[in-house]
Image (cartoon, grey):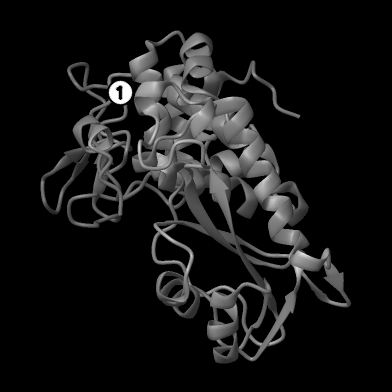
Amino acid sequence: MTDLTDPIFHDVNAARAHLESVLWPDGPVCPHCGEFDNVRKLKGKSHRPGLHQCNSCRGHFTVTVGTVLERSKIPLNKWVLAFHLVSSSKKGISAHQLHRMLGVTYKTAWFMAHRIREAMRELNPGPLGGEGKTVEADETVIGGKEKNKHKSKRNPKNIGAVGKEIAFSLVERGGHVRSFHVPAVNAKTLRPILVTQVSRKSVLMTDDAGQYRVIGPEFARHETVNHGIAEYVRGEAHSNTIEGYFSILKRGITGVYHHVSQQHLKRYLGEFDFRYNHRSALGVDDHERRNAALAGIKGKRLTYRRTDEATYA
């Protein structure tokens, strides 16, 4: 259970101490040169709270330098609370809700949410699956029907059809998920993702779509179910795990965010992936999930211009 009266959500100094304990479990580390032995905290009256000096490179720094929080004017306690709210809300939390709860402008809350998603982004992940493990692969579509959109938002070449973006996900049974925004569903698009993100020693589970029949032989074993004839489970062959993930993703986007733009879909997929990969079924509680998100701020920067222009690697 979360205690929202915890000082880290209300006191800047308590929030800073908590952030330092997460990022510097063995003591402060200079973000400029990597020094950790020859670092001292500056406690003079003219020094701002949390300021440290590296006696090797003579650089000054706080715990936020070199992170997505660098140069932020938002109090650290509000940042910690925002991280907690986003990471503990199973289907996400809107920027409007953050704006109301944190007492910041909507524009600030929107930017905060994208910085948090950047912190949740996994860097250089290893392949999913492995010998004796099963990975399910499937795609889903995100977005509304063209006929339900305002006339100015419709695709003139596809009026009346389902104009949506495609999310392709890989789920290791009992493990992690990894999602991608793809332009099309075919072997040319999906194969590079599958062979780089999934160990070829894995058992691959998919539906009976043609693109998977082309890629499947590259893995230890490939089993399919034919949804076209209402076959959803055949022994160990099924894609129910990934369908369960998609249900959380779609309910979050439909019920919380309502609309996700094409250029930012990757960020939202990363957010839902993070919460799934740190879910309670894996023994992770809300506090640990929040701290895992906070730990991800290190070594990343995200300016408003970069966010607004939707640059995302």
Q: Nearer the viewer, residue 266 or 58?
A: 266
Can you name the residue that lies furthest to the left here?
Answer: 58
In percent of width and height, residue 44 lies at: 21, 22
User: Which residue is found at the position 47% from the left and 42% from the top?
Assistant: 163
Specify whether residue 176 is in view: yes
**Left or right: 308 as drawn, with respect to 150:** left
The residue closer to the viewer here, 184 or 154, is 154
Q: Is 224 displayed left or right of 81 in the figure?
A: right
Task: Point out residue 55 in the picture as x, y percentages from the top left corner.
Answer: 16, 48
Q: Is residue 300 above or below residue 199?
A: above
Examine the rendered structure and indicate whether residue 78 appears above or below residue 287.
above
Where is residue 100 shown, x and y percent of the image? 51, 9
Q: Residue at x 40, y 11 (%)?
A: 104
Q: On the rendered image, what quadrant is the C terminus found in?
A: bottom left
- Give the residue displayed 30% in from the left and 47% down from the top: 300
Circle 1 sits in a helix, a strand or a loop, which is it? loop
Which quadrant is home to the N terminus? top right
The quadrant where residue 50 appears: top left
Q: Amino acid at mark 1?
A: Pro
**Residue 90 seen in render:** no
46 vs 28: above or below: above
Q: Relative to 125, is 28 on the left or the right? A: left
Describe residue 78's horizontal placement relative to residue 313 as left or right: right
Of 243 and 311, which appears nearest the observer?
243
Work out which residue is located at the far right of the displayed protein and give it. 235
The residue sitting at 32% across, 33% down in the picture is 69
Tell me where residue 57 appears, x and y as whole percent: 11, 51
How packed mark 1 is, by other alpha carbons closer than 10 Å (few <14, some 14-19, many 20 or more), is some
Mark 1, residue position: 49
